[in-house]
Amino acid sequence: METKVAEKIVKKWLRKGNITRCMRDILPCSGLNFDERERVAKLVHNVVRWKRWYEFVLSRYGMEINAENLVKIAAGEIKIDESVGNDLEGMKRIAIRHSFSDFLASFLVAHEDYVEKINREPETSLCVNFNRADREEIMNMLLMEGMDARKGSIPTSIIAEQKARYSEAVKKGYAHVQDESSQLIAMIATMHGDKILDYCAGNGGKTLAMASISKNGKEIHAHDIEPSRLRKLKERAALYKAKVKIGIEGEYDVVLVDAPCTGVGAARRNPEAKYVDGYGDYPSVQREILKEAEKYVKHGGYLIYSICSFLPEEMKAVATLKNFVEEKIDMKWLRRVENGYITWLLEGDILFVSVMKKK
Ligand SMILES: C[S@@+](CC[C@H](N)C(=O)[O-])C[C@H]1O[C@@H](n2cnc3c(N)ncnc32)[C@H](O)[C@@H]1O
């Protein structure tokens, strides 16, 4: 039954793309219970994660490439030899054996350590809400609900099993689901001033983390071009007991621009991003947003640019800022790249962050 549902989802995805939507359309009315649905989601994610490699293996084995066989490989019903594809060379090996678009493989061939990181199956990370409880208390709440939990690598994070996403601790606003690297960006933003504008706040992942880290001790404002996201953020902030104002008022010590991007740095959790085949208009959108946002930074204040990508054209946006100089950050969880840093945490996405000080 589970593999049949997984097959149905994969079949739809092969036709229409957007795996999240395909799962949302099919899983809730599949008749499966919670644990079964979780297992199906895992199976489907593995098909997406390894699609190009699985297809290559099937063709080498002379088998038909279809949803049924892709799911059978992911479920271990078709046994495959792990070394198939290892004989390919350079970019081709990255694209096929490690399953990436040619576009991404052409970058990753010079950055093989990213490959292993992206292909690791992710665990679930939670960001502690320090306005409600401390990390130990929240871990205890999860343990009482029968869920394994351990401390993450940064002070705000808990690594838990997948179903912690639906725990009472999360439902009641003691913690929210958030990748560790995103929590780190929120930490960096709160370190740089007291009046902070989250310019691309979305439904508030980083806004909530900042309110938590600062224990509601900073003036945090949230803005986004999409009013519906801000409405959601407001609801979440109320549950979270997070002090957050919606809208822009004057100038700020810190403006965080968590810009729209290709999302390739989060491909661990959203493996569909492994097949991104170009930049689209992201680089120009990112430059435009920075241009809008920079005017809200006071003199001597900071513009912090973050994206869940490590691709050169997307990291370049900050280089266009004329009145800013880059500020160095010294943290063991970051790796230096041009104009900024990428996050390098065991359970975290690969995000780019640059802190720019206004002259
Ligand atoms: C990567 S998401 C932000 C995620 C959010 N910071 C979080 O941590 O959950 C990018 C956001 O930028 C917003 N956005 C796009 N163009 C914008 C613009 N010109 N001004 C403000 N927000 C914009 C999108 O609506 C989207 O919510």
Image (cartoon, rainbow, N blue to C red):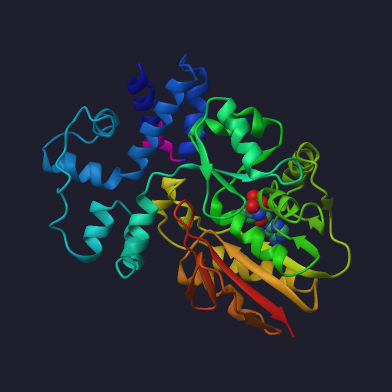
Q: Residue at x 74, y 43 (%)?
A: 228
Instruction: Say left or right for 181 vs 219.
Output: left
- Give the answer, above or below, for where 11 lies relative to 325: above
Q: Tell me if residue 190 is in the magenta stretch.
A: no
Instruction: Say left or right for 252 vs 14.
Output: right
| Residue 256 in sight here | no
Where in the figure is residue 251, as x and y percent of width and height? 85, 70
Q: Please name whichever residue, 69 or 300, is drawn nearer the observer in this view of the structure.
A: 300
- Give the answer, above or below, for where 49 lies relative to 112: above
Q: Please name whichever residue, 118 or 30, is drawn nearer the observer in this view of the structure.
A: 118
Where in the figure is residue 305, as x and y percent of width and height? 63, 68
Q: Quadrant of the C terminus?
A: bottom right
Using the rendered view, name the quadrant where residue 106 is placed: bottom left
Where in the figure is residue 183, as x and y percent of width and height? 61, 54
Q: Quadrant of the N terminus?
A: top left
Q: Tell me if residue 13 is in the magenta stretch.
A: yes
Using the rendered view, name the quadrant where residue 320 is placed: bottom right
- Give the answer, above or below, for where 114 lies relative to 170: below
Q: Main secondary structure of the magenta part?
A: helix
Where in the figure is residue 332, as x and y percent of width and height? 51, 67
The range drawn in magenta is: 12-17
Q: Residue at x 15, y 42 (%)?
A: 59
| Residue 270 in sight here | yes
